[in-house]
Image (cartoon, helix red, strand yellow):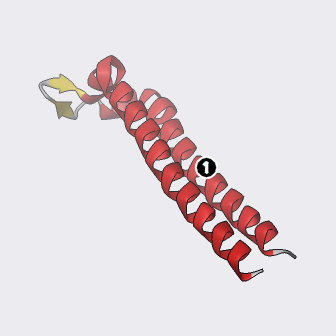
């Protein structure tokens, strides 16, 4: 297996892991809070019941956080992969 193939395989494994992790967070926030809204209604956040707050604006903040984490992490993953590929070309 060529070095560039190994770098590509490692790249896509990291991307899949990141995507899966963020999708799990998205699912828990989207589905989990709605499914357990009655049980969580006793929790108060900024003077409002947690499910109401999350439905009104909390979920949007979590979604923006997910997008930010994805963008920053992908930037780092791309830089690492680019460096690995450049290093592999110099060795060949």
What residue is rendered at 87% in x and 76% in y? 1
Asked whether, in this view, residue 53 is left or right of residue 3, the answer is: left
Looking at the image, residue 32 sits to the left or right of residue 77; the answer is left
Of residues 31 and 16, the one nearer the viewer is 16
Residue 6, image x, y percentages: 77, 71
| Residue 45 in the image: above or below residue 71 | above
* Nearer to us in this view, 82 or 76: 82
Q: Which residue lies furthest to the bottom in this view?
A: 91
Q: Quadrant of the C terminus?
A: bottom right
* Image side of residue 27 versus residue 1, left or right: left
Residue at position x 49%, y 57% from top? 76
Q: In the rendering, at what x and y percent does residue 39 appear?
A: 34, 34
Against 50, residue 77 (above or below) is below
Eyeballing the image, is 62 above or below 1? above
Residue 58 image-quadrant placement: top left
Q: Is mark 1 on a helix, strand or loop?
A: helix
**In which quarter of the view is residue 14 placed?**
bottom right
Q: Badge 1 local density, few (<14 within 10 Å), some, or many (20+)? A: few
Query: Does 80 sit above or below residue 41?
Result: below
| Image quadrant in which you'd find residue 87 | bottom right
83 left or right, relative to 50: right
In front here: 82 or 21?
82
Q: How many labels does the image show?
A: 1
Residue plotted at (42% across, 32% down)? 63
- View extreme (top): residue: 56
Residue indicated by mark 1 = 20
Q: Residue at x 70, y 57 (%)?
A: 12
Residue 80 horizontal/vertical position (percent): 55, 64
- Going by the picture, which residue comes out furthest to the left? 47
């Amino acid at each position: 297996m060529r070095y560039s193939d190994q770098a590509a395989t490692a790249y896509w494994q990291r991307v899949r892991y990141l995507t899966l992790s963020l999708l799990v967070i998205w699912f828990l926030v989207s589905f989990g809070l709605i499914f357990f809204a009655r049980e969580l209604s006793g929790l108060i956040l900024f003077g409002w019941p947690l499910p109401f707050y999350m439905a009104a604006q909390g979920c949007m903040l979590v979604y923006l956080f997910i997008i930010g984490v994805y963008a920053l992490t992908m930037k780092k993953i791309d830089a690492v992969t680019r460096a690995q590929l450049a290093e592999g070309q110099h060795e060949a």
